[in-house]
Image (cartoon, helix red, strand yellow):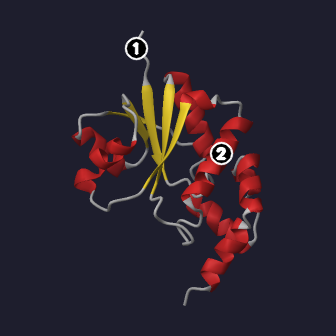
């Protein structure tokens, strides 16, 4: 039997319940999963408030909390190169070989299809609320966001004063 390994790419700022549902869906269909955290050169910005290491920690702690075997999952950090025409080969240079990619992004879908790689739908789970941008806006407004992320992610964000960081970032902009 040939083992399958799939790729799931995202910025994960923060890793939320929708991401966890995608991971669980993928692992029902594939033997192993590569979670590729993109744009890892960015942090301390409104769209990317968390460091690469903080995002790795969020995902790792979440997977442990969800009883997902870490032996089945690779968590990798991928800096962006801002050149779509070579982005897939750039990403492949950071990853173990994989058979397919799960995404909902039309750009990522097209880039991998152009490279001849099988693309599958990640599925959408309450996309109105389970979006990093929406969760960050709730954090900024001091509104309830905690139930949109796994408890382990909430605990990581709390431990690094992530909400305060995000608020400081916005206050520092003119």
- Residue 153 visible (yes or no): yes
Q: Residues within 10 Å of mark 2 (few under 14, many from 20)?
A: many
Question: What is the CA distance from the residue labelled 1 to the residue labelled 2?
Answer: 30 Å
The residue tagged with tag 1: helix, strand or loop?
A: loop
Q: Residues within 10 Å of mark 1 (few under 14, many from 20)?
A: few
- Residue 131 visible (yes or no): no
Picture residue at 57% right of the left edge, 63% below the top? 133
Q: Quadrant of the C terminus?
A: bottom right
Picture residue at 60% right of the left edge, 62% below the top? 134
Which residue lies most toward the bottom here?
Answer: 174
Identify whether 99 is placed above or below 135.
above
Dot 2 corresponds to which residue?
17
Picture residue at 76% right of the left edge, 60% below the top? 159
Position of residue 71 measured from the top left corner of the image (x, y, whole percent): 59, 28
Q: Going by the image, does 15 lie left or right of 109?
A: right
Position of residue 69 measured from the top left corner of the image (x, y, whole percent): 64, 28
Identify whether 17 is placed above or below 165.
above
Picture residue at 31% right of the left edge, 62% below the top? 82
Q: Quadrant of the N terminus?
A: top left
The residue tagged with tag 2: helix, strand or loop?
A: helix
Dot 1 corresponds to which residue?
2
Q: Going by the image, does 13 lie left or right of 155?
A: left
User: Which of the two residues, 100 or 126, is positioned nearer the viewer here?
Assistant: 100
């Amino acid at each position: 039997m040939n083992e399958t390994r799939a790729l799931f790419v995202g910025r994960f700022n923060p890793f939320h319940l929708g991401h966890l549902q995608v991971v669980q869906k993928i692992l029902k269909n594939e033997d192993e999963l590569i979670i590729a955290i993109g744009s890892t050169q960015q942090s301390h910005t409104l769209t990317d408030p968390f460091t690469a290491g903080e995002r790795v920690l969020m995902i790792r702690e979440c997977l442990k909390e969800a009883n997902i075997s870490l032996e089945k999952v690779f968590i990798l950090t991928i800096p962006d190169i801002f050149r779509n025409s070579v982005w897939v080969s750039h990403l492949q240079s950071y990853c173990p070989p994989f058979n397919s990619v799960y995404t909902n992004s039309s750009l990522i879908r097209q880039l991998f299809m152009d490279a001849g790689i099988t693309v599958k739908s990640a599925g959408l789970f309450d996309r109105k609320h389970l979006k990093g941008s929406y969760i960050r806006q709730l954090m900024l407004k001091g509104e309830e966001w905690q139930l949109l992320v796994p408890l382990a992610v909430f605990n990581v964000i709390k431990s690094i004063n992530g909400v305060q960081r995000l608020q400081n970032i916005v206050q520092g902009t003119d």
